[in-house]
Amino acid sequence: MNFLSFLITLLMGAPLETTNDDSKIQINGMLISKTYLNQISRKSNVEFEDLVFYTWKDSIVDTFNYSHIDSFVYGVVFKKVDEKTAWKIFNKFHKMIEAEGNYLYLTHISFDSTKNLCYDLAILTAKNQFEAVKIVGTNGLNYDISNEKVIEKLKVWHKDVKFVITVIDYNRVEAYMKRKPKNLETFTSEIVEFCPDIIGTGYTSEAEMSKAYREKEYFWIWWD
């Protein structure tokens, strides 16, 4: 890295860790820096596995005969990383991994053997965060909200708050807001209209939501 590149990096506040193309490897069809994989594995104390999505098929004739088809997805996953470590890894590596044409996100919130909150850390090949949501297939089908509708609405909100998606699951998306909404009350009402489950399961009222958005600049959507 020359001095000018170093100065720009320093002023922008970006991580100084870099990698050369020579250090990239193919893992489950994904091209990624070996350095990043090794560092994440070391920090999480978890070895990565191939990222696989399952499409479940119910038998029409025999209701006891269930099967699934493995979806074809490029990526890896670090399973059951404790909550604090997962967020540290996301904040440290997200931009660097995105710069390589891949997307790092948290998913599958659960509890470990000691009842501590944990996430899976997934990395998949995606052009941007919206393509990552498309691949995961996030939806609210109980409310007739397709994956396409989720992405369409997210893109509308993105124009207002310029968010960075952190958590992606089959029925959930969470994101940091880079700036507050121009009209906080309108933004809150739109989320409640699009995702009614958020009242009663996460917040008690729209006023509480608006207060949280103002203070934390973070939002999430979720369907039962």
Image (cartoon, rainbow, N blue to C red):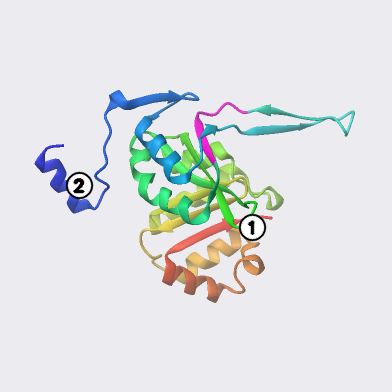
Query: Image quarter for residue 40?
Result: top left
Magenta residues span: 71-78
Q: Which is closer to the viewer, label 2 or label 1?
A: 1
Amino acid marked by disc 1: Lys
Q: Which mark is residue 9?
A: 2
The residue identified by callout 1 is 115
Image position of 171 with respect to 215: above or below: above
Callout 1: 10 Å neighbours few (<14), some, many (20+)?
few
SS at mark 2? helix
Amino acid marked by disc 2: Thr
The residue lying at 38 percent from left, 33 percent from top is: 101
Q: Which mark is residue 150?
A: none
Q: Left of 131 or right of it: where is 146?
A: right
Which is nearer the eye, 48 or 198?
Answer: 48
In the rendered image, which quarter contains the N terminus? top left
In the rendered image, which quarter contains the C terminus? bottom right
- On whether residue 74 falls in the magenta region, the answer is yes
Callout 2: 10 Å neighbours few (<14), some, many (20+)?
some
- On whether residue 119 falls in the magenta region, the answer is no
Q: Left of 203 or right of it: where is 152?
A: left
Whole-percent x, y for residue 210 in the image? 49, 72
The residue lying at 59 percent from left, 40 percent from top is: 137
Q: Left of 17 or right of it: where is 136?
A: right
SS at mark 1? loop
